[in-house]
Image (cartoon, rainbow, N blue to C red):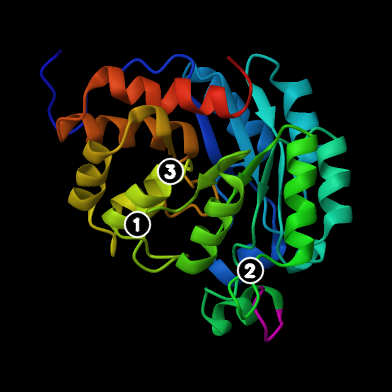
Amino acid sequence: MTERHSGTAAIALDGAIDMHCHFGPEPLVELAAKSPHSVDPVEAAREAAEHGMKAIVLKAHEFPSTLAAYLANNAVPEVQSISGICLDHPVGGLNPHAVECALRAGAKVVWLPTLSSQQDAPAKVKAFFGVEEGIRVIDADGELLPDVRTILDLITQYDAVLATGHVSTAEHFAVAREYAARGRVLVTHAMHATTGPRLTIQEVTQLADLGAHIEFAAHTCMGEPSVFTDVVSALRRLDPEKVVLATDYGWTTKVPHPATGLHSYVNALWDEGVDEDDLRVMTCDTPARLLGMN
């Protein structure tokens, strides 16, 4: 292994896939974040191609990203741009009809509520979408809601991935127990201290034991208030084949561009002693397997 100093030497990530790439414009998000997005979908794809990447998954909070992926694929065919849908208020929340339309149009990832989740502070939900109530995916007894079960069946039918969004810890475990044994579940925003479930190392490990895959995104792992050393500790307890490294970049100019940020993130993990072969599995192999691209 080449001697490494603070991630300054480039690590070869040909074939990498970023499963959490934001893009603009998204007017509501930009208004609430007080920042424009750093890339549009074509720019995100072009920069990914320049870094030798295989694919990006385009994530939007306000609309399905199917058209954005279609246009990016036409403009930058060297990289596969993959679409998805977030089940936030703008698409009707837990809306099986919107999910089926997106899946029919090629979407491969369905995120449970993110900025619209009840887990996020009501003030945040109102700031982004102008509504008072967040969205839950379980009832008072902890059971998945009927529309969620319908959505899970659609995800299975179309061979897609269920991503957990920003839902609570209890909702994460309810989804994993119900679906991880028969479908592909990706726990998103793992280890972030303020967004979503605020999962502990033990909870991340338990979710992986239930069959879920765990996403560690650069934005929600490297900066305050997250503790990067805790992220490294969690990675050392998990099978690399159950882990996805992604960025959650692109939604603001205040953080790196997605493709550049992915490499900086992987370099930082290597600096902390994470094995290079494991980094390739988590950045290339596991995402490809989840997306059916192997």
Q: CA distance from mark 1 to mark 3?
A: 11 Å
Quarter of the rendering occupied by the C terminus: top right
> Could you tell me which secondary element the residue under label 1 belongs to?
helix
Q: Amino acid at mark 1?
A: Glu
Is most of the magenta stretch helix, strand or loop? loop
User: What is the number of callouts on the image?
Assistant: 3
Q: Position of residue 131 (x, y in %)?
A: 71, 83
- Of 67 and 190, which appears nearest the observer? 190
Q: CA distance from mark 1 to mark 2?
A: 19 Å
Q: CA distance from mark 3 to mark 2?
A: 22 Å
In the rendered image, which residue does mark 3 sit on? Answer: 214
Q: Amino acid at mark 2?
A: Glu
In the rendered image, which residue does mark 2 sit on? Answer: 143
* Pointer 1 or 2: first along the chain: 2
> Could you tell me which secondary element the residue under label 3 belongs to?
strand
In the rendered image, which residue does mark 1 sit on? Answer: 203
> Could you tell me which secondary element the residue under label 2 belongs to?
loop
Range covered by the magenta-colored residues = 130-135
Q: Is residue 164 visible?
A: no
Q: Nearer the viewer, mark 1 or mark 2?
A: 2
